[in-house]
Amino acid sequence: MVNLLSKVLSFGEGREMKRLWKKVGRINSLEEEISRLSDEDLARKTVEFRERFDQGESLDDLLYETFAVVREVAKRTLNMRHFDVQILGGIVLHEGKIAEMKTGEGKTLVATLPIYLNSLEGKGIHLVTVNDYLAKRDSQWMGPIYKFLGLEVGLLQHDLPASERKVAYRADVAYGTNSEFGFDYLRDNMVTSLPDKVQRGHHFAIVDEVDSILIDEARTPLIISGPAEESTEIYYQFARIVPRLKVGEDYEIEEKTRTASIGEEGVLKVEKMLGVDNLYEHENTRLVHHLNQALRAHALFKRDVDYIVKNGEVIIVDEFTGRLMPGRRYSEGLHQAIEAREGVRIRQENQTLATITLQNYFRMYEKLAGMTGTAATEAEEFRKIYKMDTVVIPTNEPMIRIDMPDVVYKTEDIKFGAVVDEIVRRHEKGQPVLVGTISIEKSERLSKLLKKRGIPHQVLNAKYHEKEAEIIALAGRKGTVTIATNMAGRGVDIVLEEGVPDLGGLHIIGTERHESRRIDNQLRGRSGRQGDPGSSQFFLSLEDDLMKMFGMDRVRPLMDRFNFPEDEPISHNLVSKSIETAQKQVESRNFNIRKNVLEYDDVMNKQREVIYQQRDRILEGDDLSDKVNEMTAEVVGSVLRAFTSNSSYPEEWDLEGMLSYLCSIIPVQVRASDYDLEDLTPGRLEEDLVGKALDLYQKREEEIGAETLRQLERYIMLRVIDNRWREHLYEMDYLKEGIGLRAIGQRDPLVEYKHEGYEMFQAMIQNMKEDIVRYLFRVKVAKEEARPQPLRMVTSQPATKKQTTVHRVKVGRNDPCPCGSGKKYKKCCGR
């Protein structure tokens, strides 16, 4: 049955490739005709294509000619001709899919094809890379093609000012990193005037090294944060407490899930040290939070593996690339807990101001495509989360690299000794060697061993992208030994020096298997580009993290019992299969973690969309008075319902309390005695109060002036929305942190999170409206005659705001959703 299914699937793939190759053939048939055009005629093709597109021809219709034109321009400007397999990759990208192309197959050149074709729509295209160096290199390298064809190229760099960013986004294609695009989106939704926005929508993005960006970095959300008001002493206090707890007795560590959980004995000890009776009382919630983070910092995060300490600062090390990430900090107080553990100065805990996951950011694009050397192992995830199919593009030249079987040693020390022996052996005959490690710590350890043997070598610290690229590019020279983390220098080709192919090409040594097979394949892919010879081999030990994670270290006592030689490597199919099985299990677990992050963020994503849409409407609107009148009527109605919903008899209403609360928001001059209770209905009362409120607002406009009030409306609305949204993010962070405990009560944490998150969002929207109306009715404009000053708000409300509970009417499944999306409740937040 399995074989039959495989045949059916492969038959489908064969038909798909046949369809694509047919298109390539049609493009090739135009090459001779296009090559006869002069430079002027070739450049004028862009104007012709745009006119034809405007007249109704589709991009698919124009694909053949545009691709043929780009190929010809590349020949004339860069002396590079797109191979047929590169044309194939370009078609795949245009169709919004992922093109898996091996290292050295020219993915940078491939991207020029769909970029030119899709630029005809005039909506802007984003080319996303893994670092600033590659963004700059690729935009300059491919620049002559775009310039010849009349396209403008924008480049986003980390330190680019906002004015220049706006220019970059207005170009036909903008090159930049995923962080630059994502953070610009968040910053755009924090501006107070429309001209301050830099992006112009999310039409089409091509993601280079798509697996690194959309999978490896997907678990880390992009966060813009500000300092929270909290003393740092509590972190030092818990940093002193946690080391006094014993693993196995007071707390447990789970290697597979990378979690640490405190037991009852541990709780009793902590309570005694803190001098509290019950750690889990409501008022001690913050203490539990600090204990959990201090425990994670102590038990799970290792110096020189997960982070380094440099110049009194804790700097995160990317777990997949081994690259230092200055400026990035763990959230929810974890970074501060690590700083306390290391005894360095603690920076204030950050409060989230705006956040989005990379998954949800890139899903905003109307069309998304990607390219990488390793995507097939994660094809299911790309299809499920991003709705992108993966197409494996054949190599231009046959792959002749030799991938040797893994060798497994008993201990890590013996393994590294064997690695050094292998490096020395190959170095003596002049063959270049690239050694991949999984951490900075392992790189430094190997470097010390090589120095003892007198072997000259380069070590990449994964910090300076440009220098890193230069070193990696030289790794193909005779006798060169390069030590690097598995992903260092990604996106840079290693060209073999003359004579090196005769020595066997570049040899790759992996010192440890990564959790993901894809990362191992990336390391192997550094060798054997464009039909070059090469070889690769992994050296493992039973003490490696992956081995310990799945209990393979239990084999060691058996080896001791049977006197297995220390320096004898294990080489058996069972071991290799076990390693691959372990990797598949970890990949599956990591996929579930990313999926879980996305499911929780989807709740926030719907809320984020509503808030950002409201901000856009405010920024784009010239006259917001109708919106204010609508909000005023809604606030009056909600207050009225809160005080009258329990009874249909006016005599039983708390009319005095209702009018008192309403007057704290809208200063209408009205008393309970003004109404005849016999004829009073909720509808009449609401109509009268709304009328009085709108009349009062009209008088304010006459007093202040229409133009001034319009400015105030925009300013106050944006300020209130931003402040309330920031508080809501803070509350949602804490809700998510503790929601997992609901599982103990046999309740699904995700369902509970959705339900409570929706209730909190409803409350925030209501409070937001009340705040806006309150400020607009009570704000005073201070004018100075000497010189014009910006508007200043002076509220007549007391500084301490009374906390009010608002009772809400239950929303029916078929009612309009209160979040403002326009959908039915059951189709929106009620799902």
Image (spheres, rainbow, N blue to C red):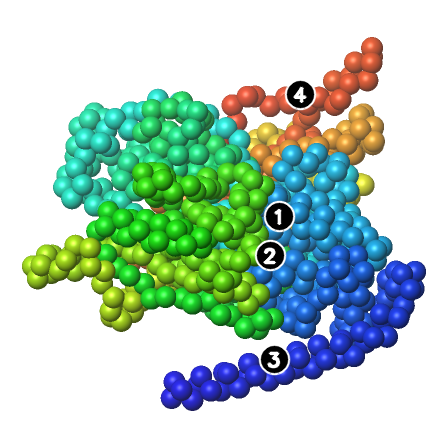
Mark 3: few/some/many CA within 10 Å (<14, 14-19, 20+): some
Q: Is residue 480 above or below residue 518?
A: above
Mark 2 is on which residue type?
Answer: Asp
Question: Residue 748: image x %, image y %?
Answer: 35, 58
Q: CA distance from mark 2 to mark 4?
A: 51 Å
Question: Does the residue at mark 1 contact the one at mark 2 (Cβ under 8 Å)?
Answer: yes
Mark 3 is on which residue type?
Answer: Met
On residue 794, the disc is 4
Mark 4 is on which residue type?
Answer: Val
Q: Nearer the viewer, residue 729 or 692?
A: 729
The structure residue drawn at horizontal position 43% and vertical position 38%, both measured from the top left corner, is 316
Q: CA distance from mark 4 to mark 3?
A: 68 Å
Q: CA distance from mark 1 to mark 2?
A: 10 Å
The residue indicated by pointer 1 is 134
Q: What is the secondary structure assignment of the residue under circle 1?
A: helix
Which comes before the other along the chain, label 3 or label 1? 3
The residue indicated by pointer 2 is 208
Q: Nearer the viewer, residue 74 or 640?
A: 74
Question: Does the residue at mark 2 contact the one at mark 4 (Cβ under 8 Å)?
Answer: no
The structure residue drawn at horizontal position 51% and vertical position 70%, both measured from the top left corner, is 399
Tell us which disc is closer to us: 2 or 4.
2
Among the 4 quarters of the image, the one containing residue 297: top left
